[in-house]
Amino acid sequence: MKKLFTLIAATLFAVGMNAKEAVDLSSIYASGTTIEFAGGWSWQGVNFATGELIQDTEAGTTDDSNVTYYDASAFDYLVLKYNSTTDVNFIIQYNANGVIGQWGPEFYQGQQLAAKNAKGGLVAIKLDDHKNKINSVAFQNQNDPGSLTVEEIYWASTAEYEAALAEQPVVTTQDVDYTTFGSYNAEQGAFVFAAGGAGWHSKWFGTFDVAEWNTLVIEVESTNGDVQFVMQGDHADGAPENMMILKSDAPQKYILDISGWTNISQMAFQNFNFPDPSIEDWATKEATAQETTMKVTAMYISKDAAPAEAKTVFSWVGGEEGATVTGGTVTGNGADAESVNMKNSSYYVIRVSSKKAAIDTDNVTITLDEALQADDEIAITAYRNKDTDANGTLYMLFENGTVIDEGDNVVWNNIHANVGQEPNTNTYKVGDAAGSKTIKLARSKSSTNVFITAISINRGGVADSIEQVKSVVLSNGAIYNLRGQRVDASYKGIVIRDGKKFLQK
């Protein structure tokens, strides 16, 4: 009796596991099982409903009482196994909801993104309470033409979907196709933001399910101006994500924690290369924007081990009412005794005027609350202010004897009226200086001073400038611009107040 029961149970289980039902898409295949999209946002679909959908265009209503829909009540998912050359929205339309919209009758709908994937992928739409009334299954490519080849598409139970997932190779990263953002220039291999505007360029996803991913990574080879990255979608606190990609000639990896996100609807980059950040009128400031070329080498989401928590170990930002510092202290000694938070031009700075030959007695000393680690990164924003081509570079001596010497390199912009540049940011890996708690600064080249407007030491990934400002702003209503300079309510543009980012108009 036991053997008979086991046999019956096994047979029933086998029947259940093979109950998935294929979806016939043959009417929209161009060749084989491939769907072709000739242009952006092309729609290809198959209707399963029969009968007349009555439309009252004057009242803006629909009546589907004469329509017979496909009943998928026995299933939990619509599963698609595919490969593609472009991002495609995978869509299911349930019964009409009684309304006529911009594009005609509206339907209850579910959607997933079948992301561009030449190697193949698997996505599924979880059916909702309307699954007994299926109207259609459709595909819509996003910005670019391309194709989607269907390996398999079927209605499935939860167990069948999970079995299909288990058969898929383990994937820990998924590329985001950054070449489809509006400003990508294939010849330059870069985003290009035109002069004379803030240069906002975006990619609309609609529905990009990232619930199972925890990290977004953007790898930048170089950028000759500051660029803001913005991400919108469904997040626990409802807020968009903002991150500044700072001007740098050196490769940078920006890591964004997306573990609180379930869906991304849009990503965008915006040019912030303003030659005169002191301009208060936003329209005038926007009109002065210079062209920025940002070379992105990789952009992907990941579900590897959770990224190390990014933190700012130390931060100093000059200010009119006194410098804001966390994680340690800054003191001037000898020739630089009066150099900390002094005013030069319109900036409050650390002036480095001492020479490396006398660094033991004449220096600016940073004393940290905690010792450096090898992967820490030092970010310094500074400038020269000279009416000649005279150069000035930094010499950094760490407690354990390690030296960073900029030598003869021209690394700092000249803000003098004859040149009209703005402060720029350079970054340095700590490396062999790990374990040190003090850093002495002097000039490597004695021809002119170096003026530091901000310095931070970041750990656990690249901390963006907004996060650096957040870490030092007290809850006192003070307002700062993106470079950490204190401004007032008349300032027009992006500001940070009490750790939050706002647009003042």
Image: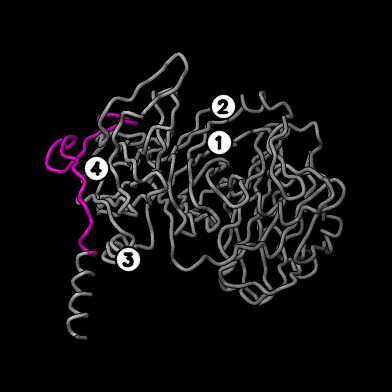
Q: Earlier in the sequence, mark 3 or mark 2?
A: 3
Q: Amino acid at mark 4?
A: Leu
Judging by the rendered image, the residue that carries numbered circle 2 is 197
Residue nearer the viewer, 288 or 107: 107
Question: Is residue 180 something that shows in the picture?
Answer: yes
Cα–Cα gap, marks 4 and 3: 22 Å
Q: Is residue 351 visible?
A: no
In whole angstroms, how far apart are the C-alphas of marks 3 and 2?
A: 44 Å
Neighbour tally class for label 1: few under 14, some 14-19, many 20 plus, Cα within 10 Å: many
Residues at badges 1 and 4 in contact (C-beta under 8 Å)?
A: no
Q: Are marks 1 and 3 in contact (CB under 8 Å)?
A: no
The local secondary structure at tag 4 comes to strand
Q: Which residue is mark 3?
A: 170
Residue located beneath label 1 in the image: 271
**In the shown orientation, is residue 230 left or right of residue 55?**
right
Instruction: Indicate which label's residue lies in the foreground, 1 or 4.
Output: 4
Q: Residues within 10 Å of mark 4 (few under 14, many from 20)?
A: many
Task: Compute the Cα span from label 1 to label 3.
Answer: 37 Å
Residue plotted at (71% across, 51% down): 450
Q: Where is residue 505 drawn, in percent x and y?
A: 72, 29
The magenta-colored residue range is 16-44
What amino acid is labelled 1 in the image? Asn
Looking at the rendered structure, the kind of residue marked 2 is: Gly
